[in-house]
Amino acid sequence: MSQRFISNVALGIAGAVIVVATQAFTPHTTGWLAFGVSLGALALLAPLQRERGQRMLDVEVGLLALWSAVASVVYTGTTLKWLSFGEGVGFAALAVAGLIVHELRTERVVHALQAVPAPDEADELQAAA
């Protein structure tokens, strides 16, 4: 599996965890969870070299992660709960978009390959004679 696929799946799972946490835990706990996921997303994106389409999504994920880290420390209560919910949905949506970009890139490669039929044995014998 490629790093692109693994990082997008990890980001999608992390976004889903934040969304669930907003409804299951207190805003304080959710805020720290969102803060941790944001820092993890930034750390995950830093060393990766990707092509243009995925890099554009990485920039968006990075901006969302920065915002999420700041918002999870600055805001409290219900505001933090719903901001974290939106950020979790945003992480999950960007992860799905990254998986779609990955799949389209893979499909493009598969469709670019052409099957060339092998020459018939009779043709080879005639050419040799």
Image (cartoon, rainbow, N blue to C red):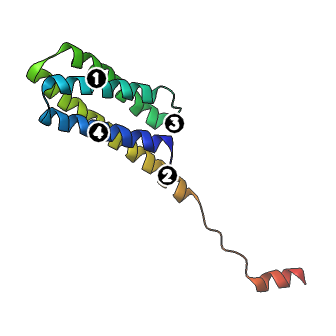
- Please state if 24 lies on the left or on the right of 122 as rendered: left
Mark 1 lies on residue = 35
The residue shown at (16%, 22%) is 28
The residue shown at (27%, 22%) is 68
Q: CA distance from mark 3 to mark 2?
A: 13 Å
Structural crowding at the residue carrying mark 2, measured as other residues with C-alpha within 10 Å and reported as few (<14), some (14–19) or many (≥20) = few
Does 2 appear above or below 21? below
Q: CA distance from mark 2 to mark 4?
A: 21 Å
Q: Secondary structure at mark 1?
A: helix
Mark 3 lies on residue = 51
Does 20 appear above or below 30? below
The residue shown at (30%, 36%) is 14
Which of pointers 1 and 3 lies earlier in the amino acid sequence?
1
Mark 4 lies on residue = 92
Q: Secondary structure at mark 3?
A: loop
Does 21 appear above or below 103? above
Residue 88 rendering spot, x and y as whole percentages: 24, 33
> Which of 117/46 is in front?
46
Which of pointers 1 and 2 lies earlier in the amino acid sequence?
1
Task: Tell me which amino acid carries mark 1.
Answer: Phe
Mark 2 lies on residue = 106
Q: Residue furthest left?
A: 78
Residue 29 rendering spot, x and y as whole percentages: 19, 25
> Which of 27/2 is in front?
27
Number of the front mark, 1 or 4 = 1
